[in-house]
């Protein structure tokens, strides 16, 4: 596959998502990292975004709740290069009614080569990376081979 790059500006566009049992963990993490985070732009799924917005001074663009399409909205924003990083505190011990949406969101994030944290430790590594404070050229597959393939019948 051919590759090109997508420029991630200094002000990163970060998606915040958390399952119910992890919302408090994400909120506490955001509060702890508020000084670093306030330099960036945020999108979040419904309840998670509302909780963070209510309890911090961060401006959040709140989308639908995850089970009501919010995960898919975040995925669409990744495809449109409107999201640079996904911080998704998910609960690996509890089944979710929208598990297919969660899997699709994580697949799109991997496909479009954006950094993803699914827990606090990884979020700490991402947010303290030298790349968070600077521009970053993210390699991006063009998917030309995929687009040009022929299906023989």
Image (tube, rainbow, N blue to C red):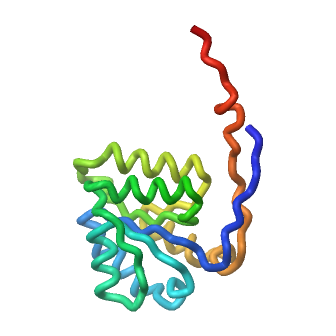
Q: Residue at 29% of width from left, 77% of height from top?
A: 50
Horizontally, is 105 left or right of 93 in the view? Answer: right
Quarter of the rendering containing residue 69: bottom left
**Residue at the limit of the structure toward the top, as seen here:** 153
Rendering coords of residue 123 (x, y %):
49, 70
Residue 99 against residue 56 in the figure, above or below: above
Rendering coords of residue 97 (x, y %):
22, 48
Q: Could you say which is closer to the camera, residue 105 or residue 62?
A: 62
Quadrant of image for the C terminus: top right
Number of marks in the rendered image: 0
Q: Residue at 71% of width from left, 66% of height from top?
A: 7
Q: Residue at 46% of width from left, 66% of height from top?
A: 87
Q: Residue at 29% of width from left, 86% of height from top?
A: 54
Horizontally, is 44 left or right of 128 in the view? Answer: left
Whether residue 136 is visible to the viewer of this picture, yes or no, is yes
Rendering coords of residue 1 (x, y %):
73, 37
Residue 108 against residue 38 in the figure, above or below: above
Horizontally, is 85 left or right of 91 in the view? Answer: right
Rendering coords of residue 32 (x, y %):
43, 86
Whether residue 95 is visible to the viewer of this picture, yes or no, is no
């Amino acid at each position: 596959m051919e590759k090109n790059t997508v420029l991630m500006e200094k002000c990163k566009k970060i998606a915040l998502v958390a399952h119910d049992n992890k919302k408090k963990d994400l909120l506490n993490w955001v509060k702890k990292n508020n000084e670093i985070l306030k330099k960036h732009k945020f999108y979040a799924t419904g309840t998670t975004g509302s909780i963070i917005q209510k309890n911090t001074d961060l401006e959040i663009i709140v989308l639908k709740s995850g089970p009501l399409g919010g995960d898919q909205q975040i995925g669409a924003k990744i495809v449109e290069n409107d999201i640079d990083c996904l911080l998704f505190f998910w609960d690996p011990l509890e089944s979710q009614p929208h598990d297919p949406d969660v899997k699709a969101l994580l697949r799109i994030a991997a496909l479009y080569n954006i950094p993803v944290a699914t827990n606090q430790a990884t979020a700490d590594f991402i947010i303290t990376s030298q790349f968070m404070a600077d521009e970053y050229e993210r390699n991006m597959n063009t998917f030309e081979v995929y687009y040009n393939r022929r299906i023989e019948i």
